[in-house]
Amino acid sequence: MAGRVEIFWHLFVASAKTFLRDRTAVFFSFFLPLVIMLIFGVLNFGAAAELEVGVVDEAGTASSQGVITAFGQVPILTITEGSREDELAALEEGDRALVVVFPEGWELIPPGSDGFQPLTAFTNEATAQEGQTALLVVNAVVAQALVTAGGGSPEPLVVVEEVAGRDLGYIDFLVPGILGLTIMQLGLFSVAFGFVQLKTTGTLRRLFATPTSPNYFLGAQVSSRLLITIVQVLILLGVGIWFGVQLVGSIFVVLALSIVGSIVFLAMGFGVAGWAKNENQAAPVANLISLPMMFLSGSFFPREAMPEFLQQVTRFLPLTYLNDALRAVINDGAGLDVIGPDIIGLAVWAVISFVIATRLFKWE
Amino acid sequence: MSVAPNSTTGAPILVVRDLRKAYGSLQAVDGVSFEVREGEVFGILGPNGAGKTTTLEMIEGMRPIDGGTATVDGLDAGSEPRAVKARIGIQLQSSSFFDELNLTELLVLFGHLYHVQADAPALLEQVGLTEKAKARVRHLSGGQKQRFSIAAALVNDPRILFLDEPTTGLDPQARRHMWGLISEIRVRGHTVILTTHNMEEAEALCDRVAIMDAGKIVALDTPDKLINALLDRGFTKERRERLANLEDVFIDLTGHELRED
């Protein structure tokens, strides 16, 4: 019946407008994930940190300068030249992984020959691992310089061949996690708070005074939140791609997953909103549901980093299913066949949440 | 102030018979019966907790009826609450609307909930809120909010308008403005049923009043007849030869104009 569709449409527009004009809601659901992504994207925590090497050139010869220039050409080294005193102080403070000293009168001479002097290197016990790595690199550079200076071939001893492949950085890991997190937060909080507010202010009661069934209103509320979630997923994914994340799988599979995930958390949100009498009851319960998943479902860091028993428990959380599936699709191009078990997991959660929500729901 | 037409004519538009509602052991409404004629302004008076609001809610189809019947414009409120709601307008004691929509958007939305195209500008003009067409409800004063909720209750051109304590919490100017508005609404042919615990208001507006206490109607008649009956029983009050009261002083000093905020 056209009239019913029309009523539904107008309630849908009203509830979407109510959400989009509420600045706090928009900030927390749209901009916060965006800000998190920007911060992590710019900082790029996943990239291998460069090794800071301090150089003290007490020799000041052409050959010492030549070796120092060669250090500078190694991509993973950051070279700082300074006095012995300054560089050792920086090492103590952890600002250097290694300090290399070229002693006075140092020349590039092979060991065992006349006038040979070794370089001195200082490491800090606190950062021993980085110090050892830097030391290996420094040794190799000096050895290579010796070979070249002795008339040896300037060819490298080990030839590197790069395999064409995708460089999966932290941002690739993070973006699907942020998508999952946003879907959860939007479903859980926008409904839990928005709906409880309509309850406490009496807006719902006023709707009961009209001949339209409140179920229309519930349906409009759910579908407007679904649409907002889809728009949000597209925006975040767009920003992710702009940061260099590669969308290997199908965008439609990502959207389908987002909808399934959304339904789970919307049902939970309605359970909370339907049960709670006011915001003070809704807030702690919504947080109790979302906070553990925020950190245990692999949104920010891999679940593999957690103790074994915790991994076993957390793999059944709804956000874990959603994050794993989103990652499989976005990073590895998985299709519905691969993520099938995750979708089944989400479907089970959707049914559980829906049953609990309808049991707990109170209109007043 | 009330210009009641001959209130003994007109067919009953609302018939309430032995209405009952219990909350646990509390009999909130205990066998209430009355009739309201078309075009009448009917008041239900009584102290807080007398059962006024519960009675109204059962008639409006908003609360299940435990016993008795309420027939609204020929429809049974117990079995056809939706059909009843479609023909009446309801102003709730404290209702709120979607916070983020403006007045025009809200009236149009409410129109759709009744399957009608609401004429928002006309409704706003009727309640004196034309200038607030683009404002949000939360930015209105108390009196403006009440007038807006009357506009929202009028979107479906209801046969009966139910007003639950329409002037509670309003200052004297806003209250008198509301009285004027209710009189205009009755002149346009709507039947009005209102609750109040302001006796002056009941006297000024209502053709007939029912006085409720502890879930029962203890008296029902025109305000004049109720007062005369009391005097006939030999009631006397300490005589006061004043022809004005403090409210008259207040209105005289501060003017009749509405104060918004």
Image: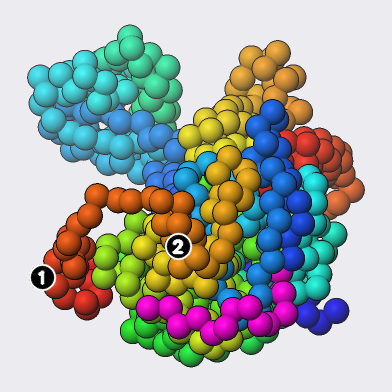
Instruction: Give the mark, 2 or 1, whose residue is nearer the N terminus.
Output: 2
Q: Gap between marks 2 and 1, in whole Å?
A: 33 Å
Quarter of image, res B260: bottom left
For the residues tagged 2 and 1, is the chain the same?
yes
Where does the magenta region start and end? Answer: B1-14
Residue A243 position in % (x across, y down): 50, 57
Q: Residue at x 33, y 68 (%)?
A: B175
Q: Residue at x 34, y 56 (%)?
A: B169
Q: Which residue is mark 2?
A: B228
Residue A230 position in % (x across, y down): 65, 61
Side (left or right) of B31 relative to B215 = right
Seen from the viewer's position, the closer of residues A354 and B255 is B255
Q: Residues within 10 Å of mark 2 (few under 14, many from 20)?
A: few
Which element type, helix, strand or loop, lies under badge 2?
Answer: helix
Residue A260 position in % (x across, y down): 77, 50
Q: Nearer the viewer, mark 2 or mark 1?
A: 2
